[in-house]
Amino acid sequence: MKWLSRKEKLVLHGRSMYDEAIRLLRLNINEHPESDFNWANFDGIGQAHLELRDTTRSIENFRTSLQLNPDNTNAAKILEQLDDN
């Protein structure tokens, strides 16, 4: 049995926090599909996937956010940065 280092524990804890944030934001979207604020939920999911280094899912969610709110400068800026890489 391997004991986790403090750093490994923090990484796992951080990952579970992002996974939980994604779950809650998706739940909010599913419970309120017609909400005018779902662009912000998709933006948050994009941010969480970005932190988890899942760029494919991050891009998908930022694109959806931008489709729902073309004035979302955060999504536009991040998509531009990801396209440059």
Image (cartoon, rainbow, N blue to C red):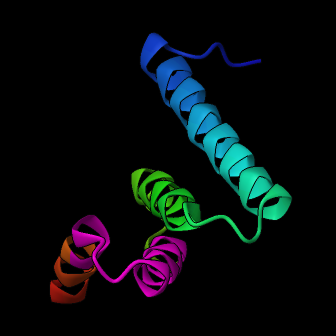
Image position of 66 (left or right of 42):
left
Residue 8, placed above or below residue 59: above
> Which quadrant, please, contains the N terminus?
top right
Q: Residue at x 46, y 87 (%)?
A: 67
75, above or below 4, in the image: below
Magenta span: predominant SS is: helix
Q: Quadrant of residue 42?
A: bottom right
At x 43% / y 73%, what residue is drawn?
55
Measuring 66% from the left and 51% from the top, which residue is drawn there? 25
Question: Does 24 appear in magenta?
Answer: no
- Front in this rendered view, residue 13 or 25: 25
* Residue situated in front as seen by the camera: 62 or 14: 62
Residue 63 x %, y %: 44, 84
Q: Residue 69 magenta-drawn?
A: yes
Instruction: Please state if 21 lies on the left or on the right of 5 as rendered.
Output: right
Query: Residue most toward the right?
Result: 31
44 and 71: which is toward the camera: 71
Horizontally, residue 42 falls left or right of residue 83, namely right
Indicate whether 67 appears above or below 29.
Answer: below
Position of residue 19 in the picture relative to residue 76 (left or right)? right
Identify the image quadrant of residue 72.
bottom left
Q: Which residues are magenta?
A: 57-76
Q: How many marks?
A: 0
Quadrant in which the C terminus appears: bottom left
The percent coordinates of residue 16 (x first, y second) are 65, 34
Residue 3 coordinates in the image, percent (x, y): 64, 13
Q: Quadrant of residue 26?
A: bottom right
